[in-house]
Amino acid sequence: MSRKIAGLTAIAALMAAAAPALAEDRACFNSREVKNWSAMGDQTLLLRVRTSEYYRIDLSRPVKHIRSPAALLALVSREQSQICNAGDLDPRIMLGPRFSLGLPVAGLHRLTEAEQAAMGETNLPGRHYRRRNQD
């Protein structure tokens, strides 16, 4: 019996050690690594993660409150704060000390370098300080 428990414990330890490597392959991020966010319309959020990674969250229906200047984004993850796909995410918009609104997530997508370039650096969250005057 103790051999079975030791074997299961070893297998669990190996799986736990492999989990971060699997998460990196799937472009996962920790909810605490989100540095900034912005809304593009009523159905799309952009996240800046770490220093130069960007993710798009597509909502299944429009939510006008996400563009409110008073809105704060709260990202709650369902699995140990690792967000790898839309199912791991439970975002909420905080509109006041006692009022939050759940957001209906339809998809999560990591933006490629080409998608970031097409969007323009001034449209990405956290990049507004880089706006240049057009002479």
Image (cartoon, grey):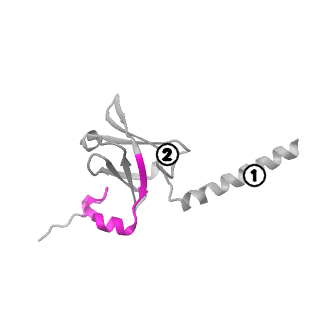
Quadrant occupied by the C terminus:
bottom left
Asked if the magenta segment contains residue 24, the reply would be no
Q: Is residue 2 left or right of residue 96?
A: right
Q: Residue 96 at x, y = what percent?
A: 30, 32
Element at label 2 = helix
Q: Which residue range is magenta in the image?
A: 106-130
Among the two numbered marks 1 and 2 on one chain, the one whose residue lies closer to the N terminus: 1
Asked if the magenta segment contains residue 122, the reply would be yes
What amino acid type should be assigned to the residue bearing mark 1? Ile
Q: Residue 46 at x, y = what percent?
A: 34, 53
Residue at image location 82% in from the left, 44% down from the top: 5
Check the image and report above or below for 58 versus 100.
below
What amino acid type should be assigned to the residue bearing mark 2? Gly
Q: Residue 11 at x, y = what percent?
A: 75, 52
Which one is in front, 32 or 38?
38
Element at label 1 = helix
Q: Residue 98 at x, y = what percent?
A: 34, 28
Q: Which residue is mark 2?
A: 87
Which one is in front, 13 or 114?
114
Residue found at the far top of this picture: 98
Q: Residues within 10 Å of mark 2 (few under 14, many from 20)?
A: some
User: Residue 74 appears in which quarter of the rendering?
Assistant: top left
Residue at image location 39% in from the left, 61% down from the top: 111
Residue found at the far bottom of this picture: 135
Q: Which residue is mark 1?
A: 11
Residue found at the far left of this picture: 135
Quadrant occupied by the N terminus:
top right
Cα gap from disc 1 to disc 2, whole angstroms = 26 Å
